[in-house]
Image (tube, rainbow, N blue to C red):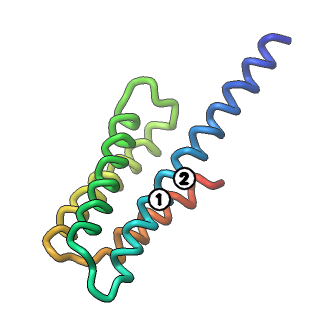
Amino acid sequence: MAQARYAEIVADDGANARRTEFVAISNVIDALGAVAGAAIPSFDALTTALDMHDALWSIFLEDLAGDGNLLPLDLRASLISIGLWAVKESANARLGGDLKTLIEVNSIVRDGLGR
C-alpha cells in the first residue's frame, strides 16, 4: 500500500515539474514574442527576454547533465543539443538576429512538455 502511494507521489511530482517547466518556458516565449512583435523593439525588453531565456536553458542544461536525471540518455542528449543551440541562437539575437526560429524551437520544446 505504501509503495503504491509513493508511486503516486513520484508521478505527481513529475507532472508538477513538467507543468512548472511548461509555465516557465511559456513565459520566456511570451517575452520573446512581445519583443518580436513590437514595431520598435526596446533594447531593454530584448535583453530581459533573452536573459530569461538563457537562465531557463541554463537550469534545463544543468538538470539534463546531472546524474539524477531520469530521462533516457538519448532524449537527454537531444535536449542538451537543443539547449546549446538555443543559447547560441540567443547570443545571435543579441547581435540583431531574428527571434522567430528561437521562439519556434522553444514552442516545440514547451509543447512536448504538455503531453
The secondary element bearing badge 1 is classed as helix
The reply to whether discs 2 and 1 touch (Cβ–Cβ < 8 Å) is: yes
- Eyeballing the image, is 63 above or below 94? above
- Classify residue 6 as left or right of residue 101: right
User: What is the x, y in percent for residue 26?
Assistant: 50, 60
User: Which residue appears at 39% of the width and 24% of the height?
Assistant: 67
Asked whether residue 85 is in view, the answer is no
Residue 37's disc number: none
Picture quadrant of residue 38: bottom left
- Eyeballing the image, is 39 above or below 27? below
- Type of the residue with mark 1: Asn
- Eyeballing the image, is 29 above or below 84? below
- Type of the residue with mark 2: Val
Residue 27's disc number: 1
Asked whether residue 20 is in view, the answer is yes
- Classify residue 94 as left or right of residue 2: left
User: What is the x, y in percent for residue 27?
Assistant: 47, 59
In this view, which residue lies farthest toward the right?
1
| Total marks in image | 2
Q: In this view of the protein, which residue sits in the foreground, 73 or 65?
A: 65
Residue 23's disc number: 2
User: What is the x, y in percent for residue 55?
Assistant: 31, 47
- Classify residue 57 as left or right of residue 1: left
User: Which residue appears at 57% of the width and 61% of the height?
Assistant: 111
Quarter containing the C terminus: bottom right
User: Which residue appears at 69% of the width and 31% of the height?
Assistant: 11
User: What is the x, y in percent for residue 34?
Assistant: 40, 74
Quarter containing the N terminus: top right
User: Which residue appears at 80% of the width and 11% of the height?
Assistant: 2
